[in-house]
Amino acid sequence: MGNTNLTIDWIGNEALRLAHEKASFIGTINREFDSSFQAGYGNTIRIRIPSQYTQVAGRVIDVQDGVQQSTSITVATQHHVAMRYNSQEMSQDLVNFQRLHLEPAMAQLVSYIDGQCLAGCTISTYNAAGTAGQAITGLGQAGLARAKLNQFLAPKMERRLQIDSINMSNLVSSQASYFNPSNAISENYREGLIARTAMADYYENERVATITNATISTQPVLATYTIVEGDTDLTVSTMSGVAPNVGQVFTLGTGASGVYAVHPETKAPYNYLQQFVVTSGSTSSVINFQPAIRLTGARKNVAKSTGADLTPSTITTAVVTFLGDQTSTYGYPLMYNRDAFTFATAALPLMDDAIRCVVKTYDGISLRVWEASDIRNDEKLTRIDILWGIAAIRPQWACRLIGTGV
């Protein structure tokens, strides 16, 4: 009997369900569906970030101007997957169609986008925990990452860790005796997964980002460069004529002359150097980076080891130290709060001449399914499209883990 239930609505709903199931990373971050996106309105979503203030002692009022910060997501990346099936295949039941066509198609589409998003968010994350070259065999590195999320005021709910199966296996093996007594964790132990520990939900994901360090054989230093407020680039020397790779993490200075991280509210210094991440456009003499350096005020994010404001004129030749060994490639499991990153989709238009074309949206993800027939080959063509964008809204609410090279 022919299948009368294989409608475009069913395909759209099932594709959306599969997208949610297979989105290991996208499904755990903020998802913003922009229903207002349409021709003539541009392709950018603006997201406001709360202002920052400083407390003032005494009874005399000191009114501070609220500096409204914002960031944006460009929803302009379109990907699709296309299928074809003939009349005989169309007569199959829903289970066979889903197994033979829809599931592998959606797995390919979602896996690629999920991997691109995880890699992009990892590259945007400047905080890192752990020691390069030391294997992730316990909860020590995860605990350090959790501490950095705490220190940068990430909410303690909805934290996740994306980790590859090799490191996950090491964690399960090393922590088996600790987790096994709990029934809930025991089930995950048998499956080779850790459900929740170190204040995060653990997800096994083979798409964990890898970043290769550039071959910089000499110690880079600032080229008599004076840092200014809001700096996002540094002039350096002795870089061996090589540009650092996007995503490499580095610090400035050492010891008492180092550039230290501070508590976002009290501005008290932490006992470690502020970390920065290399961004695109860097050369062998100029490093572009994030976050921007804020020397004073409510947005201050660096200080001397004593907590005093940084004196740029005293560190014009500070050393630049990259995380990890030169030429080594590291895989970076990523711990983050849900709102550190935002994934946004927009509804693609329904074409005027398309008889069978629908847009399905659920829980922040929008897909368009479009069908047409090929009379010459007795086939039906189906394409599933998604228009998406992603941005690191609060990268300070995320932290990479570093271990041995890959």
Image (cartoon, grey):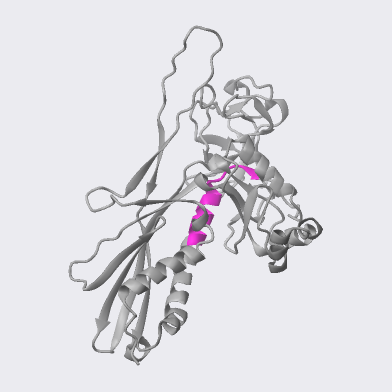
The location of residue 40, given as percent across then percent down, is 22, 49
Classify residue 140 as left or right of residue 66. Answer: right
Is residue 125 covered in magenta? yes
The location of residue 280, given as percent across then percent down, is 48, 47
Quarter of the image containing the N terminus?
bottom left
Relative depth, front residue between 8 and 242: 8
Is residue 376 covered in magenta? no
Residue at position x 31%, y 74% from top?
8
Q: Quadrant of residue 264?
A: top right
Q: How many marks?
A: 0
The location of residue 395, given as percent across then percent down, is 53, 42
Seen from this angle, which residue lies furthest front? 183
Q: Is residue 272 above or below residue 329?
A: above
Relative depth, front residue between 370 and 363: 363
Classify residue 3 as left or right of residue 228. Answer: left
Residue at position x 50%, y 53% from top?
120
The location of residue 318, given as percent across then percent down, is 64, 31
Q: Is residue 53 above or below residue 142?
A: above
What predominant SS class does the magenta segment belong to? Answer: helix
Q: Is residue 203 above or below residue 257?
A: below
> From which residue to which does the magenta span run?
114-128
Residue at position x 69%, y 60% from top?
184
Q: Is residue 123 visible?
A: yes
Classify residue 256 as left or right of residue 390. Answer: right
Quarter of the image containing the C terminus?
bottom right
Relative depth, front residue between 319 and 123: 123
Residue at position x 44%, y 71% from top?
106
